Image (cartoon, grey):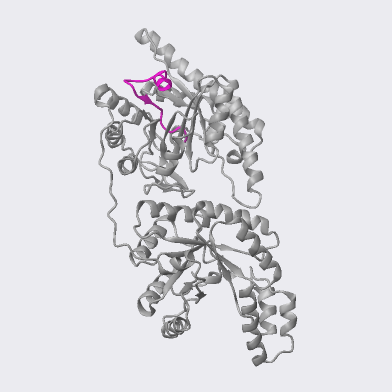
Amino acid sequence: MKEKFNKLNLKDGILLFDGAMGTYYRESSKKPLPECEMANLFDQGEVKRIHSEYVQAGANAIKTNTFSANTRSLNCEFDVVEKIIRRGVSLAKESVQIVQDQSKIEKGSSKSVDIFADIGPITYKHDKDSEKERENIFDEYKKIIDIFIDEGVDKFLFETFYSCEFIEDLSNYISSKVDNPYVIVSYAINPDGVTREGYTGQELLNATSKFDNVDSIGLNCISGPYHIFKYLKEINIPRNKEISISPNAGFPTILNNRSYYSNSSTYYANQIEEILSMGVKIIGGCCGTTPEYIMKMSKVIEKMKKSDISIQKKDVNIRVDSEVVENTFYKKIENNSFPIAVELDPPSDIDIKKYISAARRLKDAGVDAITVADCPVGRARVDASIMAVRIKNDVGLDPIVHFTCRDRNLNATKALLLGLNIENINNLIVVTGDPIPTAERDEIKAVFNFNSRILTRYIQGLNESVFTNRMIVGGALNVNVKNFDIELKRAIKKEEAGVQIFYTQPVLSLKAVDNLKKARKVLNSKIMGGIIPVVSHKNALFMKEEIAGIEVGEDIIDTYEGKTREEAAVLAVEISVDYIEK
């Protein structure tokens, strides 16, 4: 890997990439197109000018203007994507040639510049058709790679990726088609070191460092140079690959849905010097970085002697552990002690006396834990996490917090998780969350920054890097859906993300029992079976017809018909016990 790196066009042992085509194109073009990749076809002069400016500023590697050149990002047919890629390669080559010719005239010599195929992520939803979607996306990646290869490109940059899902297969594919290619893979992390898919930068770098046909690994986008430098100091950087770092210019200002970056090129270059001192040898710029940034980075490289650019021994950031507290509820599950958890929804006002009294009665009855829903059916109730603290402190029962993806961004989510962990509330049920009722949507908007799978993965990252007392993540398992095979596939994905317990919807039909048996054979996680007492014929019909996710068997409905309230109460216990036995 190191030998291949030395064959690149280095500047004092460093490969200096260009800056951001997209943001600079929107900033400098008089009439920018909405998608800068389309400029390869309809604004070619601007693309050549920008490439040339970056090379003149000192870049010895440039990216083709093809980051979003795929059918999904550009919402076009693949024949258009092919034209964009082919012209993108030509424009990069022509721009380099123009600068080389000019340099030859002025200086009598010209430097060589590496051209990298720039490939960004093709996103897709992990839903019932995700396997088919994944195959389609992988096929499109291969078609994109084939075009670059046909144009004579043998260097590839996969940048701003959020997971390593396709990376090993794609790098192997390139290696099977090209002699001695060079492949860089770069992930986009936020200042907390997490991607939008919930993976930490550390685990992605570790995983990708094991891929034989990837030459360099690194980080780019979302975060500025300070946060990436800070993150690099906190992790154990894999050293079997060259490290590539291309931060954003900083944090943008958003005006009219457009991102604007202040000019902080001097500060940026100073931070890059710190990053280079850690042994990083591939450097560049992402969103907001202009030719001025590249020029100042080039001067930093010139200033640093080759001997100075060496791997410095860094102090490993040692986590300060708090007191270890036993998770009594989860220990009972691990020991197969069949614990009982009861869902008790928080009140919708500030009077919690009845709630606390009910929780105490449940404790006296032998309940092991109380699950606390997070604003069920999308209506406001006392915050589940605050209620959980009261249950733990006032009642002495383990609370299990329903933790939804709704209405919290990443900052709010992390803040709440830190608070729960400090209070030693470490049992969660991560769910997407009910939507806000239709009539309220015009005035109140739901916010979903991630799904339950991504949130689970994020929590597992905190378990590895922050928490002394691990948070046990539970997930929902609907045994009443029509196509349970699809539900099982989703559950497997959740399990891969870190779910350790599944809580089922109420089991009130033989079909649900059969599905539970299927789940037991397939899933490795523990399963908490859901039971809900049916208290009347009317109640049975209401649950069947009105409550999503609950299926009541016709035999149960028929059994309640004509029963008195007292008779129905006896049936409720008998049927619940019967399904517990099942």
Tell me: residue 109, above or below residue 414.
above
Indicate the position of residue 343 as horizontal and vertical percent values: 51, 75
Q: Which residues are magenta?
A: 3-22
Tell me: residue 248, above or below residue 462.
above
Tell me: residue 187, above or below residue 335.
above
Residue at left 63%, top 58%?
487
Indicate the position of residue 31 as horizontal and vertical percent values: 51, 34
Residue at left 70%, top 67%?
511
Indicate the position of residue 340 as horizontal and vertical percent values: 51, 74
Tell me: residue 132, above or below residue 384.
above
Using the image as rendered, state which of residue 265 and residue 137 is in the foreground.
137
Please state, as top left, top right, bottom left or bottom right, where the C terminus lies in the image.
bottom right
Indicate the position of residue 524 as horizontal and vertical percent values: 55, 56
Q: How many marks?
A: 0
Could one spot residue 403 in this view of the protein? no
Image side of residue 389 versus residue 529, left or right: left
Using the image as rendered, state which of residue 45 and residue 522 is in the foreground.
522
Please state, as top left, top right, bottom left or bottom right, where the N terminus lies in the image.
top left
Image side of residue 404 versus residue 239, left or right: right
Membership of 13 in magenta stretch: yes
Using the image as rendered, state which of residue 479 and residue 67 is in the foreground.
479
